[in-house]
Every structure is written in structure tokens, then in C-alpha cells.
Image (cartoon, rainbow, N blue to C red):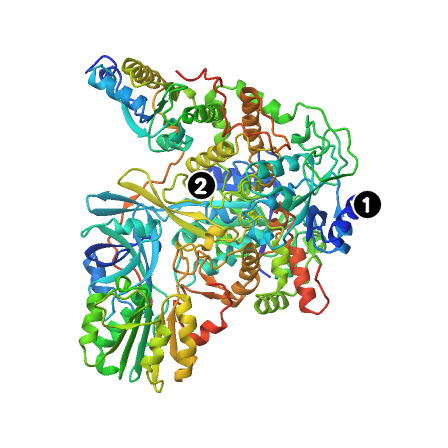
Amino acid sequence: MNVYQPFRVRIEERIDETADTRTLRLKFLDPDIAEKFDFKAGQFGEYSVFGAGECTFCIASSPTRKGYIECSFKTVGKVTSAMKDLEVGDVMGFRGPYGNAFPMEQMHGGNVVFIAGGIGLAPVRCVIWNVLDERNKFKDVTIVYGARSVADLVYKRELEDWGKRPDVKLWTTVDPGGETPDWKGQVGFVPAIVEKASPKADNSWAVICGPPVMIKYTLPVLKKLGFTEDRILTTLENRMKCGIGKCGRCNIGPVYVCKDGPVFTAAEMAKLPNEF
Amino acid sequence: MSTTTFIRTADLKGLVADFNAAGIGVAGPARTSDGAVDYQSITSFDAVVLDAQPRNSLKQFFLPPTEPLFKYARQGQDVAILEVPMSFPPRVLIGARPCDAAAVEVLDRVMNWDYKDEPWFARRDATTIVTFACPGGDRSCFCTAVGLAPDATRGSDLLLAPAGDGYVVEIVTPKGQKLVDAYAKRFATGAGVDATKAYRDTARASVEGHVPARPDVIRAWVETHFEDPFWAEISMRCHGCGGCAASCPTCHCFDIVDEPETLTEGVRRRNWDTCQTSLFTMHASGHNPRHDQCGRCRQRVNHKFAIYPARFNDILCTGCGRCARTCPAGQDVTEILTRIVAMATGQGGAA
Amino acid sequence: MDSATPAAAGGFEPRITAFVCNWCTYTGADLAGTSRLQMASNVRIIRLPCTGRIDPMFMIKAFERGADGVIVSGCHPADCHYNAGNYHARRRFAIFRELIQFLGIDTGRITFSWVSASEGAKWRDIVNDTVTRVRGLGPFTAYRKLVVDPATVPAAKVTSKEVPA
Amino acid sequence: MTELRELARRLLSEGTVNAVLGWEEGPRGARPAFVTTPDGADRLIFDPRCVHDLASYLSPRRPHLKKLGKVAVVLKPCDARAVAGLIRETQIPRENVVLVGVRCGGVLADPESTAPLSETTVADRCRGCPDREAKLADHVVGTAGAGFPGPSRRAQKIEELAAMPVDRRWDFWQAELSKCVRCHACRQVCPLCFCERCMADKSLPRWIESSPHARGNIAWHITRAMHLAGRCVDCGECERVCPEGIPLGLITRKIAQVVSDRYDFRPSDDPAVPAPVGTYRMDDPQEFIL
């Protein structure tokens, strides 16, 4: 037994989100682990396909929902390609949870704005679920989610559910040209929609995740709305092998994404050297 | 001062014979077929070469270039995990250099950073390090600039220094004491540490002054000069070969890969890796946060002299100089550090 | 059991991987089959578009995965479906063969041949000769011993893996 | 040396090039130098310690050097063969680089050596080298020694190995190749290993196991040798840089012999001569093919 040996998990369900994005619901084989396993919103794990290797993703489900974990991935490399070939019932590996988490307790009693682009909704979704499962602990909940096109929107069923809830303000948007004739959401880039949604900054937290260019242009909007850098939270990813601070490749300057992250405030991000 | 004892050279030979007889593995610096000196398995103390720095370091005895982490076997949809036992036969490393022994202890920090690396510590537990005080080094040695010395005891269980017809033995750790107790007949009373002073002084003199002993200044400069053109300048000659990392006693970065043996079975292995190659940080998408050699050269210096000190209050370098000796393009860490100190203290340094 | 695979003789049956071109040798092997020519059953054929596609890595991979011998075969010179694939391959094979011989691999483990679509009988001979020759050389244990991993034990029931706060 | 420095100074001050790649005195002997100012030309040296093949720096795999723009590079005759290889394989446009040949009568095995160049200290690959200056060069400077006669010790070792039974040869190579830690230094310094992404780094599929066990190592070294067959210019860098001291030169030299014997090809600094792998003759020998 060593720290690199994963738990075994079985694929309970697989949901195709888009043409190249899929969500897997995983259950621990060992009932003891299934019972004891706990994590915090924002933490990540090393998922493995035996024979292909390991891959790092955040846990896309919420710690408030016990007994399983979910991950969403885009098919790009060796491991994600192998993951795409797995069927329901197949056994995978999981190591974790690793890394820090969103400061859920601190956020209690505040408003929360979620801003996500593309597959970046996966880590944000974990917090959204967490917040909605403990809805009375938070005030206003606003979600701004954008993708390149309607076909690229992930978690479509959940978007529908969130849209129906009276206690959630949901703004979905697609890039100009990405809309379909029956698209009822917004058309435009995420920063513009955030400005349009204009969530109030007072006693608020923003959780943002998406392509670097989206984050780059959304941050000034949030600042203009009055959000301070220490209340804008994001989650980073970098190539990792061990997930536990030893293999030496996820650091951005002095900061280890696996140990100090993956969750960072915009204030912390601003101090990082330009190496991510 | 720790307690000392004494061992005659003849008894040292006998000690290695005792280890052999007891089935304890022995490794030490010995000649290779191509004439170099490597730490390697030995069966006799006669093979030990003490007057040349070994080409490799000790890290391979604790973090092998490749090691299996576990095997897997698929049965239908299920997968069985077969564990590699995390216990290793006892071994004595004899003739270790102080810089190499210290490196092992430096690495204990990261290997135990919140999560214990069992393969590393299982080998650590099984291994006793018998270090010989260094006779002195060449112009690339700079252990005294990173808080060590040719007779530093750090990381060693026993430290031997020559005196008369044998060696004064400093007992550094309980593990060292245990070895001395177990083979008490091989040890005797003899000269004290004082008798080795001249030897130690000569060694120290040979390595001093190659790099200013200002690790704090180096760290401060590296921490505040991420974008300095210095990095681009020194990286021009770098081939990105990673020879420095391979020979380094403290470079410990690794890769984890799955290797299928058959359609249903395979092994997950951990292999040495190096920050000097582009693949090291490349994302599956093709994006590479460390996209050129400039960033990679900076990373190596940064990790050793700024990041590790910030994390563990310890320098990830023991001044052995191997990276300078092995670099095919003449990149020299002593030069880099000396220039950094010069730039930091306002004494120029630009080429 | 036909005469070319005397399994009763000693137990060792070599595993042979054949890399053949689609146009000539594969068709030739097919002809051998449809002509009901008797031959050893030790060969597993991997069909490729052309000998020009047969990278020496394929042969290394075959040995890695347990082959005791390899057959490489394609169109005769001047017969290549793509005009020159076999000419290019011929140079690479020649160099590869001398290289592995230099590194200590018995070249008796690899058969190179040209077998046309009409040479079913030649394919049978190539197969039988190779099987006999490799049987004589014995299993390729030297290659299989290149990696010897420590004995493993089934994973203990994991119950106490720490979940950090 | 003065001639070299004057030429470099002129090329830099006239703006013909932005940088001159040559050798300088480093902390441990000679090492590659990147001179970007006319005054810096005085740093340049050439002596038998200048063993490094600077053609490596012209490889397109080094994007950080592209920033230098047009460069001049100082070349020994063997290095010129590497440049010819890069031109032949359309990796660098000839007009983008100024080639400064230095006349050479052999170099030492080790750039740190302080020994005079002699029959015993000369790099083994220089024994029997017929080239004293690069024909490909735009400028040629310096004077050449007489060179050293062959055969090289490697050639003798190759014969010795060839005479061994095959399984003893296997044992010899396993002892050597098992030392490999797969740092890939041999690839990184090779002037002709210019692939954007090396086959050894590709994982879909994983042809070459990346683990430094004997099985991965032999696959890597066979592949490396095959990919350099007929392209290797015998600059000796792979063997020099190997941190484990593996005699890689024996493998490349062996293949050079095969290519020479079978296809009458010897690496030259003429980019117009086609490489032997990638071309063919209809009557190439095929005695090994049934």
C-alpha cells in the first residue's frame, strides 16, 4: 500500500454533455470508503484508467451529496480518450481528495455570483450544488454561464432546473453566432452578460472559472461592480502527476496548484508570476 | 559533539564482509567499466574508491530511476490492484559523500510534505548511511555556500574521517549507534576527532569561495526577478537535456505512467523526470505554461534556491557541483549563483 | 495436428507475429489458406498497407509483448502497389537487421521475405521454416527478462486511507 | 583566433548577423558562446577543447534561439556535416545562416581537458576523419593540424563485439543500456534530432515505454539509432553528454559502417547529396530477404 495507490470506483452513470464532454458518476467499490469518504467543494482528485494512466480533475459533484463523486472531462489526451471508452460498470481508480477548497463557511450569509465558461462550469457546479443544497445559508444566487454555442453548453438538464428555481437568477449565454433558432438565453460574451446581470457586490462572493481570456475580461467588470479581489474566487489547473506536492510540475513560481490551490482568490492570482 | 569511536581500515574491510555474511546489501563508490566512479553494489571494501566524487548520487537508492507502484489486473469490468510490498531488505551505503548524504535528508522534507511517500521512507528505514568525510573537491564544489561542509554530518548515520591506520567514527544517529553496537568487535578506541582536524581543514579550504555563502541573498533575488533577462541569457546555451537533473542528488521530480504488459494486466510505474524538457509541464491541450527554455532554466534555480527554502526552510542543493560537471554546454551553477549574488549586491554581473 | 507443429515433441510452441503488406503477402497468405495448404498455426498476421508502413518499432513491440519470432513480408521489388514502398522498406530492414544483430538479438528470430499474391506455397514454406527455426532458438526469454518486477500481493482492504482536512 | 574574432566583429558590426555562435572560455573549459555585440567577439576562442557541435543550436526545436534572428555559426568540418543535414532536410534555409568554418585537425575528447592534443588525448571520432575544413562554409578561418589516422578505437571495439557470440553481445549491451535513465540528453544535444515532438514523447499510442527499465531502454536506443541511420554525422555529442557513460558512439558508428558498406554513403557537408534512408536503388542488395 502506498500513497499512489488509488481507491477503486465503479462507473454508475455516464452522461454525454456535449460532443466531446462527458460526466461520469463514480461509486467507491469498498463500502467503508464509500461511507467515510468526504471532501470539500473545490477539491480535486487523480482519476485513473488502468493501463492508460492518471488525469487530474476537480470533483464536479457536491460534498453535500454523499455516496458518489462525479467528474466531467473533455476528450483531449491519452487518459481522457481512454475514459471516453469506458462503459457503465467499468472500474476506474481515484486518488484524493487533494488541494484546498472554496471557503464555504466564510461565504455563509452572503450573496454568491457564479460565472463560468464552457467546461469551466464543472468545478463551479460543485459549489452551485453545495450552495443550493444549503440554500438557506446564502442570500442571492446568480449564475452566469456561457459557451461558444448551444451545443457546447454542459449540464443542460441542471441549467434547466436552475432556471426554474425562483431563488436562482440564471443567465445563460452563447457567443454571437453560436445560437440556435430556438435559443432563449442571451447572446454575447460572458463579461458583457455579467455587466448586464449586474449582481450587487455588497456582501457578495464571485466564483469564476473558464478560459483565461474570459477571466481576463470578466475581472475588470467585477471590479467595476465593486467586487474586491479577495472575494473573487477561481480554480486553476496545471499538469500534475502526484497531486500531493512531490512530482514538482504544477507550481506557478512558488505556488503549488496541488497544495496551495486549486482555489485561489483574484488577489492571490494577481501575485502569481506569469507562468500558467 | 556526538559520541565517537574508531575503526581500523582492516576492520572496515571486515565489516563489509560481516554485512555480506549477514545478507545485508552493501553499496559504495566503485569503478565502472568505463572508468568512472559510481555508487553501486559492492561485495568488498577493496572496491571502494574514496578520492573521486561518484558520477551518480545516492538518490537512486531511495528513488530509483523507475519503480513499480502497483500492478493491476482487469477481470471483465473489474480491476484488481496488486500491491508492491513496501518493505525492502536492509542495506548499508558505505563511502557516501557528505553532500550526497545531506541531499537524502533534504528530500525527506518534500517526501513527507503532508503525505508520506512510502516507497521513499521504506527504503530510508532499511538503509544505513555510512559517510566518509570528503577529501576536498574541485572548482564546482560549493557545499559551504549552502550551509554544509566536506565533513557535514547531515543525513549520515555515521561519519568517518581518516586518522592514522583507520577512521574516527562520529555516531550521528541512533541508527548509526545501532550499527556500531551490532558490530562492536569491529570498532575500537583510537584517535579522537581532533586527529582529523588537518584533513577536514584542507578539504574545507578546497571548496570554499567558489560561490558566495549568501543563500539568503540568492533567494531574495530569485524571488523578485522572475522576469529578469538574466534567465533568457543563461538559457541560450541550454539544450534542455536534463543531464543536470539526472545527476543531481536533490532533483526528485517524477512522472507516473501506466505500462500495460498484456491486454488485461499492467504496471503503474514512477520514473525520474526533469523540469528541463518541454513535455514536463505541457497540458494535454498543447498549452504549455513553461513554454521555453528560459522558464525551465529559471524553474530549476527557483525551485532549489527560492521555492524549497520558502516551503521547507531548506535549500534544495547540497553544492555537489555535478550539474556543472555534467552539463554538455558548460552551464555552471557556481557561475549562475555568483552572478546572482553580484547582481543582488549591486556589483554588476551582466555579461 | 499437422506435421509442422509437433506440439507433442517438447512443449514449446513459438509465438510468431507476422507483419505483412495488404497487396501481396496478405493475399498470398489468403491463397495458402484457400488452397488448404498445411502450415504451422503459430503465426498471427498483422496486415499493413505496405512494407513501407512497417516501422522497426513494430518488431520491437512484438518482442516486448511476448513474440518469439517475427515475419516481415511484402511485395517483390517492382511489384509494390505504391511503386516504391518496398524499396524504402528494404533499406530500413537491412539497417535494422544489422543493428539488432549488433545489439545481441539473434536475427534468426526475424524472417524477411517477399511473397506475392500468387505464392501461397512460398508463404507456407516461410511460415513453417520460421516456426521450425524459432522453435530451435527457444523462447525469447532474454527479452522477456528485461523487466522483472517484484512479486506483488493482492491489495489489502483499504479502510484507513487518510482523508486530509 | 584573431582571424575568427575579426570576422565575427565585422559580421556583427556590419549588421550581417545579430549573433555569432562560437566557443568561449567557461568556468570548466571551453563552452558554447552567444556573442551579440561586436565587442563580445573577443570572447570567442577556437582550440582543441571546442568539441561542442554548435549546429545543434540551429535546430528548429530551439525556439528560444529563434529570437536571435539571423546568426553566424562557427563550424568544425564535422559540425558542417550537421548543418548540411539540416539544410538537406529543409530545417533551415541556407540563406538564413552565415557559416564560419574553422580549420580543424581534431579535438580533444573532453572540453575541460588541459592536455595537449595528441594521439592519446584526441577524441576517438577524430581518428581517421578526412575533413580539415568545411566546404559548405561562407568563410573559413584558422589553420589545421594534420589530423589523426584511423582506425578509431570504436571501430576496433565494434569488430571485437562482432566477433563475440550473439548472446555475449546481448550481455554487453544489456550491461550498458541498463544504465540509461532516459534523460534523453542524447536526443537533446543531437543536431539532427529536430522533431517537434519526439516519438519517445508520444503517448497515443505509446510506442516506446518511457520507463528507464531495460525493455524501455532498448526500444529507445534502437529507435534513436534507426531514426539517425544515414543522418548521423558522427559529431560525438550523444556519447559525450550521456550522464551514465553509455558508449552510444558504438551504435551510431556501427550503423554508419552499414550505410557505408551497403549504400556507399558517408556523411558529407554537401546538402545536395541525398541521404541513404529516404532514397533507394532498385538493385540494392537484399541477401537477407527470402
Which label is found at residue D199?
2
Q: Chain of mark 1?
A: D
Q: Amino acid at mark 1?
A: Thr
**Is A100 rendered above or below residue A168?**
above
Give how far across and how far down residue D26 sits, in percent. Answer: 71, 50
Labels 1 and 2 within one chain: yes
- Quick one: quadrant of the C terminus of chain D? top left
Callout 2: SS: helix
Locate residue D242 relative to residue D17 in the image: left or right: left
Look at mark 1 in the image and give the residue it sits on: D2
In the picture as drawn, the residue positioned furthest to the right comes out as: D2
Among the 4 quarters of the image, the one containing residue D85: top right
Q: Given contact means CB atoms under 8 Å apart, are the residues at marks 1 and 2 in contact?
A: no
Crowding at dot 2, Cα within 10 Å, few <14 / some 14-19 / many 20+, comes out as some
Q: Could you tell me if residue B172 is visible in this image? A: yes
The chain letter under disc 2 is D
Determine whether D131 is above or below B267 in the image: above
Q: Nearer the viewer, residue B169 or D205?
A: D205
